Amino acid sequence: MTGSVRRRNPLALAGEMGMALSMVAGRSQVARAIVGEANLTGHDKAADVGCGPGAAVRVAAARGVPVTGIDPSPVALRMARILSRNSPAGQVTYSPGSAEHLPLPDGSLTVVWSISSVHHWADLAAGCAEIHRVLAPGGRVLLAERLLRPGASGHGFSSERAEELCRTLTSVGFTAVGSHTITTGRRKRIIMRGERPAAGRAR
């Protein structure tokens, strides 16, 4: 009906809430690890792409870094805002968006990370190019995924797929591209990283 409010499917909404709750329970340890890998300083401005309920956003904000959490799920963002009410004033912002369409100005950040969400991206090259766009020269990106067995697919990346993503990062303009693994709890994670070249530095 024209002018009517579109109601969301209750089952879909319940599924989103369940996923967001599971992320609250499961992301604290990996959030601390990835924020540690980012080597944040008081001069950084960061974004978490696919932030979910905002665990890594809050860890970074507690270190004095202003952070924007971005996620396509209204339910996850609502939960993130509730859980972040006690974060330092002015340090945390949440916005709807996707990796392929980041709601951020060009060159506005020094660090971007994504934790366990890259495997959901519709277009890896477009997502990497968007991150390159919003990073200032010298900025860095960290993309973390659960490490899967060779040939496996699902919620994570195999080492082969990680290599493919590293090639994509290079193709959109990142330098110092590479990957390494860490262990959080019982799970192995693979982190793919790169830097946007500093001004005046050749690729």
Image (cartoon, rainbow, N blue to C red):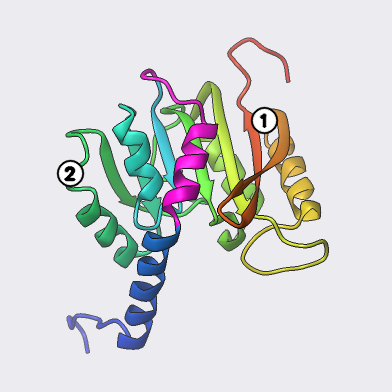
Report the disc number at residue 186: none
Q: What segment carries the magenta color?
A: 27-43
How far across and how far down the image is residue 89, in percent? 17, 34
Q: Which residue is mark 2?
A: 86
Q: Secondary structure at mark 2?
A: loop
User: Crowding at label 1, few (<14), some or many (≥20) Cα neighbours within 10 Å?
Assistant: many
Give me the residue at 45% from left, 41% from top: 32
Asked whether residue 133 appears in the rendered view, the answer is yes
Q: Quadrant of residue 201?
A: top right
Could you give the CA–CA distance between mark 2 and mark 1, rounded to whole angstroms? 35 Å
Q: Is residue 148 left or right of residue 85?
A: right
In the picture, the quarter occupied by the C terminus is: top right
Give me the residue at 50% from left, 48% from top: 30
Q: Residue furthest top?
A: 200
In the picture, the quarter occupied by the N terminus is: bottom left
Amino acid type at circle 2 is Asn
The mark lying in front, picked from 2 and 1, is 2
Asked whether residue 134 appears in the rendered view, the answer is no
In this view, the residue in front, 186 or 140, is 186
Q: Earlier in the sequence, mark 2 or mark 1?
A: 2
Give me the residue at 62% from left, 56% from top: 187
How far across and how far down the image is residue 113, in percent? 51, 41
Residue 35 lies in the magenta stretch: yes
Q: Residue furthest front?
A: 186
In this view, the residue in front, 41 or 131, is 41
Q: Is residue 122 above or below residue 127?
A: below
Q: Secondary structure at mark 1?
A: loop
Residue 103 lies in the magenta stretch: no
How far across and how far down the image is residue 13, in percent? 33, 79
Report the disc number at residue 174: 1
Q: Quadrant of residue 68?
A: top left
Q: Is residue 88 above or below residue 21?
A: above
